[in-house]
Image: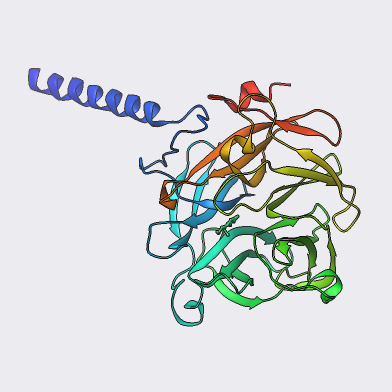
Amino acid sequence: MIARRLVFWSCLAILLIMCLVDAKSQIAFFTPGQTILDTDGNPIKAFAGGISYFNGTYYWYGEFKDGTFPTAAIVVYTSQDLLNWKYRGSIVPGLHEGELAPYVSVERPHVIYNDRTKKYVMWVHPENQEYNLGLTGVFVSDSPTGPFTLSGIFHDRGPDGGGPFNDDNRDQSIFKDDDGKAYHIFSSHKNNGLVISEMSSDYLRPSGHSIDVGVVCEAPTVFKRNGVYFLLRSECSGFGFNDNKYATADSMLGKWTDHGILAQGPNSANTFSTQVTEVVKVRGKKDAYVFVGDRWKEPLDKTLDIFLPITFTGARTLAVYWKDNWDIDSAFNK
Ligand code: GAL
């Protein structure tokens, strides 16, 4: 009898400890500037990436750096709350083999879902060691966690398919609009231009319709709020930092109006030492958008990603302020 009781109480104690450990390992706050650990306790390495939302889950795609190739792998993490991320592994098998061998660097992965073809489509920027290819790569998958297979590698051309520009495609992002149309947004003309190019309806190629916003640019990313399109971008300083800027427009291929620097307040110089990579719309909250920037650090696998809430100061104006510690409920409790 005593032995049985001992076993019972021991089991209960172990269960309690397991619950406490689990509760403790849940991350409850963003702590910008500190390493973000995944649910296995490893630092997250998904740099210069994009965060998508599919069927109730956030997917964080990014460049995994480990010192072998500039992009050792394209990886994805998943989360329900933007704080606790589970590592789901590399999503492009054979990234540096076969026809993908020339591309040591495969930058800025972003994924959208095509409702008609029922495929997840990823656009990236494949590069060689010399950094003189300036290409666009498109991959497809039946699942948001891959495996993704190559659909095509090409140059997305400048305004309306040509013109007097170099047609290099460098830092890039993609954006799917509410009407199902999708766009490729990329630095071009040796980073002296920013092209927005509408995709074909299957999201696998450019449609041929594009504009050049005409600004110096790296790391572009677009989101939409109350019918207004916001385009955030950095200037060009490699893995250094600069004052990132933003513009707005009433349509993706319309006229963009520049609004200047996005980071405001104390410590905001050089965008708090980050380079924008994404803006995430928080689901289940009104008017909640999160800025995500890379704080590049050599060796590059020591880079940190910084999450900060966006404050809207008008229908077309925003600001990002530094916070050492914050959470979604308090930041967007309006
Ligand atoms: C950065 C760019 C990165 C990467 C890097 C290479 O400016 O945003 O995506 O291309 O330069 O030096």
Q: From the top left corner, tell me how far across and down residue 222 is, in percent.
A: 74, 49
Residue displayed at 68% across by 25% down = 265
Above or below, 272 relative to 94? above
Above or below, 293 relative to 333? below
Q: Is residue 268 left or right of residue 224?
A: left
Q: Is residue 145 left or right of residue 4?
A: right
Q: From the top left corner, tell me how far across and down residue 301 is, in percent.
A: 42, 51
Image-quarter location of ligand 1: bottom right
Q: From the top left corner, tell me how far across and down residue 299 is, in percent.
A: 40, 51
- State the quadrant of the C terminus: top right
Is residue 258 or residue 26 the one in the foreground?
A: 258
In this figure, which colouring scheme has been used for the structure?
Answer: rainbow
Residue 87 seen in this snapshot:
yes
Task: Say how many tags the image has.
Answer: 0
Above or below, 100 relative to 49? below
Q: Residue furthest bottom?
A: 98
Residue displayed at 62% across by 58% down = 110
Q: From the top left corner, tell me how far across and down residue 193 is, in percent.
A: 77, 61
- Image quarter of residue 23: top left
Residue 54 seen in this snapshot:
no
- State the quadrant of the N terminus: top left
- Image quarter of residue 215: bottom right
Above or below, 20 relative to 77? above
